Amino acid sequence: MKTNRLALFLYILINSLFILKYGLRLLPWYVVIAACFLYGGIVVLGNKYKYLITKLSYLNIQRGTTFIALIICLLFLLAFQYIPDPMTIQVDRWSAIHNFLFNLTHGIYPYAAQTHLDGYGSPFPVWQLFHLPFYLMGNVGLSFIAGILLFVHSLSLHLKDKEEQIAFVFLACSPAFIYEVFVRSDLMTNFMVSMSILLYCIHYRLTIQKNPLLLGIIVGLMMSTRFSAIIPFCIYYFYDFFYAKLRQQISFLSVVIITFCITFLPFLLWDSQMLLFFEYNPFILQTRQGHPLDLLLLIPVGIALSFWQQKQPNRHFIASAVMLFLLVTVTFTHTMFVNNSWTELFDSTFDITYFGMALPFLCATLSQLPCSQRC
């Protein structure tokens, strides 16, 4: 279970970063360090005895208990989200979406909308429109509920013996995820949705050889949420792409690009100057933290991970998690090297919430049980 140990290490590391960053603002350093060790110990112990959750699934009240536990957890997270006044939150991902949709529904160019912290929104059109029902409900942060439901249901199609329940427990016990809900951030939700859509594609056996057009449309739409949201698709389907015929490869890539461009077409016709040449347009905002040279390392690693996972969902979870973790780590390290900012990880220069992109995949990896522990 080497993949489980790696997932456990990364899960504890990412969540400990959140405990450190935000704990040090409120408590003495030694209390925060002790909290990290305590949290790590609890997670290790929970991982060791996680099979007990599947034991409970064979009780007569299994379905009712699972449903009630899920509802209670969602209600708790929902109540937690409504504690702060959103205008006082120093994270503007929620207002980047809310103000975009406000402009859109009022006939104002959406990407001209500024956040409540005077920034500009980076999410692409499909992800903005995904939040329209939640905007109409008065809170775009409610999208995390849809993300969780998709996450649990899509995992149930691939895992065994109620292991999706374990994945949900790991997600709900993640300080990084709780923080995301608290500040109404959409980042981790984006990756829960991306992971779920990919699992549905796997469940319905979509391949580049047999379904290049449909799969191309799906990947193009997912690319129109965030560029990084298609990394799990790249990891899973590159192995497929490599063995596809040239005609199938061209068809697939063409449809991906055309679909992605079509999602921007209304905004291009609306105000092409601002969409393409404004210094804070969404393309610049989504790529400004990266460095082209990083791709020289990341692309070969991604290809190696794709061939290692060989389209096996269980391997794919950890492969995607490692790739997303490396993407952030390499980017941050490069920036620290260029700016000589090695001690500023917890400053505003670096947004550690990007590490949370890997958490849904880590939770899925940790949920898997050895055959000997399955009921």
Image (tube, helix red, strand yellow):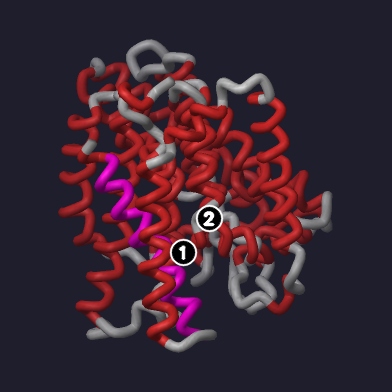
Boundaries of the magenta span: 4-25
Residue 69 versus residue 144: which sits nearer the camera? 69
* Image location of residue 199, percent across then percent down: 46, 27
Q: Residue furthest bottom?
A: 28
If the image is split into quadrants, where does the C terminus sit?
top left
Q: Amino acid at mark 2?
A: Leu
For residue 371, which numbered disc appears in the image? none
Q: Position of residue 222 (x, y in %)?
A: 50, 39
Residue placed farthest to the top in the image? 210
The residue carrying mark 1 is 353
In this view of the protein, can residue 218 be seen by the observer? Answer: no
Q: Does residue 330 show up?
A: yes
Q: In percent of the image, x 64 and y 58: which residue is there?
A: 271
Q: Which mark is residue 187?
A: 2
Q: CA distance from mark 1 to mark 2?
A: 8 Å
* The quadrant where residue 309 appears: top left
Name the residue type under label 1: Thr
